[in-house]
Image: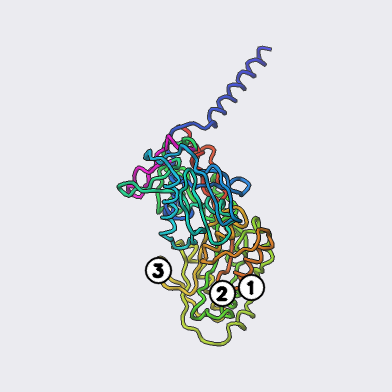
Amino acid sequence: MFRRSVISLLLACLTLSTAARTRPHYGGTLRIETQGDPWQMPDGMARRLVLDTLTAVSDTGGAQPALAERWESQNGGHRWEFWIRPGVHFQDGEALTSDTVAAALTDVCARPVAGMGACPWKTVRGVGPSVVFVSDAPEPDLPELLAQTEFAIARQDATGAVIGTGPFRVTGFVNGALTLVANDDCWSGRPFADGVELRTRRTVRDQWLDLSVGKTDIVEVPPELLRQAQQQHLNVLVSRPVDLLALAIDPSGWFASREMRQAAALAVDRTALYNVIFQKQGDVTASLLPQSLGGYSFLFSTERDLERARALRGGATTSPLTLSADDTSSTMQLAAERLALNLHEAGFNVQVAGPGARPAAALALRRVHLEATGPQAALDEMLARFGQNSNVNGTDVAALWQEERGVLNTETVVPLLWLPRAWAVGERVRDLRLSSDGEPLLADASVEAR
């Protein structure tokens, strides 16, 4: 009996010790390294930590309250009213009001950003405790659209620094490191970590090296290196496919004819990109929505038809055409070169622009990030990213398919692959999860003391 009592006591101590090690606690600094701009839209990490949106994406894909606690549609979706959550303050102590929200959203529409769509409303104004949106056309998915980081609520202080209502606030940017500290008075609760150190413009090689020696806690894992990371036994978190790789075709010059655009679309070899460049990660696609959202992407053919591409192109000699990639990574350059080879086989004279070059290109290889998780909001978002207007007539899958088919039949956008996002996480980090669009939820993560 004594022996059993001692064993039970030891097991209880071990259980308590394990629970203590895994229980989230406050303190410490999360160290993160990335390649990109922390303020870029839609996936800049600092932007998500400092700023909030009126709504947020729920686990089921719909909109849930954030800075707006409730909303109501009026006049058949032409008018929306969002009631602002009371008691919320910016990180400098100024109260969040309907007027400051309307001013921030008006500023967003006044300063369009390349690759982002136009604002889905005609006017926005503060009315008492609520913000009222009025649009020319019905906007049934406005609550879902307002969850996108494009519409995050921000203001600037006298020095020009960006101020939000999010869980962290900016304290400095020195030697490529952006430092953030916890917002103790955040309306959604204080984050567990005392701060975040975000080092930008770091190559993947340097990120992985720093992770291996304990200099950082969270690093990027590009999809083409996901298998390698797993073979090295890194602790990797992987999202669903959230990045669309697509070929955008300028419908002017040589591609003013739809037959020429069709020829280019039929010449691309998606399977080679999937197998060779991206190491069989993600999904081959010819759809603007992933299969998990639309449910109909299999209806769009992904097969290459080189003979038909040659027939549509005809025998005319083309002047050199430029194909550019929207980022300077070696993987995107390799993918662009592979596509140029595909097009050359169909008779097009295509040259790939060098890294960093921004020429006026007839063809552009783009990687577009998807935030929305609802089918209609996702299609609206993707169309906006490619400069297309959404004219969806209805909310069912058939209406979405008809709208997407009409856009893809113009052959100005050629979807190629849907790719996941992945992150390798160090031993100090506890309870880190990814958002629905593959970004780390840092406010919910904690750092284990060592």
3D distance between C-alphas at marks 3 and 2? 22 Å
Residue 360 position, x and y percent, is 43, 73
Q: How is the image coloured?
A: rainbow
Residue 60 position, x and y percent, is 63, 47
Residue denoted by label 1: 304
336 within the magenta span: no
Q: Kindly identify the amino acid type of the residue bearing the numbered disc 1.
A: Arg
- Say which quadrant the C terminus sits in: top left
Residue denoted by label 2: 342
Q: Nearer the viewer, residue 227 or 336?
A: 336
Sooner in the amino-acid sequence: mark 3 or mark 1: 1
Q: Nearer the viewer, residue 119 or 72?
A: 72
Residue 177 is marked as none
Sooner in the amino-acid sequence: mark 3 or mark 2: 2
Q: Residues within 10 Å of mark 3 (few under 14, many from 20)?
A: few
3D distance between C-alphas at marks 2 and 1? 10 Å
Magenta segment: 168-187
Residue denoted by label 3: 357
Q: Nearer the viewer, residue 383 or 216?
A: 383
Left or right of 280, for residue 430:
left
Residue at the far top: name it.
2
- Looking at the image, residue 193 lies above or below residue 277: above
Whether residue 227 is visible to the viewer of this picture, yes or no, is no
Secondary element at image label 3? loop
Secondary element at image label 2? helix
Sooner in the amino-acid sequence: mark 2 or mark 1: 1
- Number of marks present in the image shown: 3
Dominant secondary-structure state across the stretch colored magenta: strand
Q: Kindly identify the amino acid type of the residue bearing the numbered disc 3.
A: Ala
Residue 208 position, x and y percent, is 46, 49
- Looking at the image, residue 220 lies above or below residue 344: above
The residue at 42%/37% (across/down) is: 183
